[in-house]
Amino acid sequence: MALVDSYPQCSKNARGSLGARLQELLTRIQDDGEPGHKRLASALLQLLPDVLSTNRSVIGSELAVTRQDLAELTGTTLYTVSAS
């Protein structure tokens, strides 16, 4: 508590980070009932801001995420990711 009292911005940042993680968790729980291709689309949309922030030219750029990474991220199989 002394840290929070001394550094109120630290507390604010921690709450913001926890809130964002909670929202991400709730989205993933909601997506669990969706078909694999919809979960894959949702995961790709979540990755898009990171791609845009690192490389403004998305066309022709490479994303260092494998199909196996996407399968694990979406709770699907490698076949589902490849077929989608």
Image (cartoon, rainbow, N blue to C red):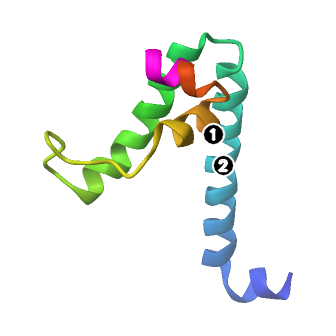
Could you tell me if residue 84 is visible in this image? no
For residue 29: magenta? no
Three-letter code for the amino acid on which mark 1 is drawn:
Glu
What label sits on residue 21 in the rendered view?
2
Q: Quadrant of residue 74?
A: top right
Q: Residue at x 35, y 45 (%)?
A: 49
70 relative to 62 in the view: left or right:
right
Q: Which residues are magenta?
A: 80-84
Asked whether 84 or 43 is in front, the reply is 84
Q: The residue under label 2 is which amino acid type?
A: Arg
Q: Which disc is residue 24 wearing?
A: 1
Q: Residue 34 location in percent, x, y? A: 63, 12
* In-front residue for pair 61/52: 61
Q: Are marks 1 and 2 in contact (CB under 8 Å)?
A: yes
- At 51% from the left edge and 15% from the top edge, which residue is drawn? 37
Q: Nearer the viewer, residue 63 or 31?
A: 63
The answer to whether 65 is drawn above or below residue 38 in the figure is: below
Counting other residues with Cα less than 10 Å from the Cα at mark 2, is it few (<14), some (14-19), or many (20 or more)?
few
